[in-house]
């Protein structure tokens, strides 16, 4: 179950591949349950396949139609994953 008070954040990698239709169905299902949806995508026109009201935060990477497209998602994902750590460390240093 998703937390009602704190909206659970769910991150999706919407890449231009054979799994896109299933991923879009998953986004709709999670959004209906009340989650915050974060999408990393290499699609230049993501809003043509899913409505903008279904995506809370959108991170676009360079459109790359190859097997290496998922590698382009690694730097933004690392930034998202390490930001809370750096924020916590900076507040500890300041005090």
Image (tube, rainbow, N blue to C red):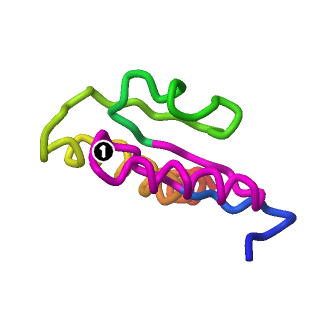
User: Residue 92 occupies which quadrant of the picture?
Assistant: bottom right
- In x, y percent, where is residue 83? 48, 50
Give above or below for 57 relative to 18.
above
User: Going 40% across and 44% down the picture, which residue do you hit?
Assistant: 14
Give the quarter of the figure containing the N terminus: bottom right
User: Residue 8 occupies which quadrant of the picture?
Assistant: bottom right
| Segment colored magenta | 11-39
Which is nearer the eye, 55 or 75?
55
- In x, y percent, where is residue 89? 50, 58
Residue 76 shown left or right of residue 51 in the figure: left
- In x, y percent, where is residue 43? 36, 30
Which is nearer the eye, 89 or 35?
35
Give the quarter of the figure containing the C terminus: bottom right
Residue 19 on the magenta segment: yes
Which is nearer the eye, 20 or 5?
20
User: Residue 50 occupies which quadrant of the picture?
Assistant: top right
Outermost residue, bottom side:
1
- In x, y percent, where is residue 66? 13, 39
Residue 61 shown left or right of residue 80 in the figure: left
User: Going 46% across and 54% down the picture, which residue do you hit?
Assistant: 23
User: Going 66% across and 58% down the picture, which residue do you hit?
Assistant: 29
Q: Which residue is mark 1?
A: 73
Residue 32 shown left or right of residue 65 in the figure: right
Outermost residue, right side:
5
Residue 81 on the magenta segment: no
Give above or below for 78 relative to 76.
below
Residue 42 shown left or right of residue 55 in the figure: left
User: Going 39% across and 37% down the picture, which residue do you hit?
Assistant: 41
Label 1 environment density (alpha carbons within 10 Å; few <14, some 14–19, many ≥20): many
Instruction: Name the secondary structure under disc 1.
Output: helix
């Amino acid at each position: 179950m998703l937390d009602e008070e704190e909206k659970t954040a769910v991150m999706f990698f919407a890449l231009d591949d054979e799994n896109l239709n299933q991923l879009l169905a998953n986004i709709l299902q999670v959004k209906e349950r009340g989650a915050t949806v974060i999408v990393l995508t290499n699609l230049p026109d993501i809003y043509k396949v899913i409505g903008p009201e279904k995506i809370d935060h959108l991170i676009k990477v360079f459109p790359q139609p190859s097997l290496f497209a998922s590698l382009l998602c690694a730097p933004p994902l690392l930034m998202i994953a390490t930001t809370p750590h750096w924020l916590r460390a900076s507040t500890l240093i300041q005090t």
